[in-house]
Amino acid sequence: MTEGLEAILADPAGAVIGLDFDGTLAPIVPDPEAARIHPAGPGVLARLGDLVGSLVIVTGRPAGTAVEYGSLAGVPGLVVLGHYGLERWEAGRLTAPPAHPGLARVRAELPRIVAGFDGVRIEDKDRAVAVHTRRAAHPQAALDALRGPVAELAAGTGLAVEPGKFVLELRPPGTDKGVALGAFLRERSARSVLFAGDDLGDLAAFAAVRASGLPGVTVFSGSAELSVEADIVVDGPTGVVELLGSIADALSVSRSA
């Protein structure tokens, strides 16, 4: 058992459990709008919400979408930080700053940039816009070809590009999952932390766990090439849910002892 897990089990009131959504709680699917949480996820999270100090989801999705796709509205004490921390959902209330003005130009010009790539689709996330190549005949080749034009558009509109698994997302600069998680740890006066993620964008949150100086544990549920960055590697959302369930089981036993 890692030091971070030991600290969470010994002092659950001081623990923050942080989670990505896609690829961590919900399987990756060709159509992002079809993504739904692992069937056992809502129940496990509801148990944890009653057992630990804080439960937070940090996602690139709009916060409300993660709540809907995850059936999470009833999870006790849950906070969802959407758009890499720009949005916050808590106790049924959503707060967010105004949308970045550069997104209007992105919506106007991006269709022309991707027009020659069959199977490439645009996802409008309201406060960000993503280009997905997963459905292209050659997803990696399409992604590589689009990096330059998408980066040029981002630079001209004051946006940042967040790369992921066959996706390039244009979003407002200045925040990432590490910034969002670090601020949340300070807000909650955390004494220990776990963060689970599966993609490049989650590495900033892993770094925030290490930089916090707290007993921490990072959990990776994605592709093997990034697994060296984590303390624990599990098999996709099923593995994440099983790990969270085992933590809930141990805390329940400890509480009843």
Image (tube, rainbow, N blue to C red):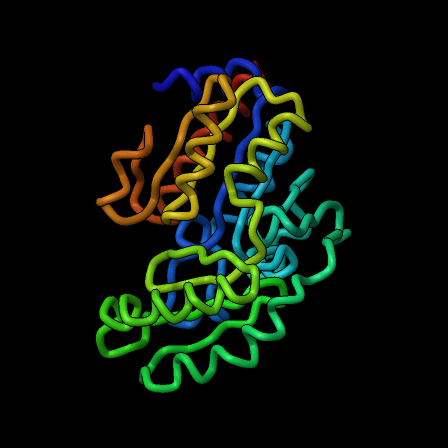
| Quadrant (top left, top right, bottom left, bottom right) of the C terminus | top right
* Residue at image point 51% right, 80% down: 109
On screen, residue 107 above or below 41 = below
Q: Quadrant of residue 239?
A: top left
* Camera-side residue of 42 and 115: 115
Give the farthest residue toward the front.
Answer: 156
- 151 on left or right of 173: left
| Quadrant (top left, top right, bottom left, bottom right) of the N terminus | top left
On screen, residue 147 above or below 192 = below
Q: Position of residue 143 (x, y in %)?
A: 30, 68
Q: Position of residue 13 (x, y in %)?
A: 63, 20
Q: Position of residue 131 (x, y in %)?
A: 43, 70
* Residue at image point 28% right, 71% down: 145
On screen, residue 193 above or below 191 = below
Q: Position of residue 2 (x, y in %)?
A: 36, 19
* Residue at image point 48% right, 46% down: 20
Q: Quadrant of residue 166?
A: bottom left
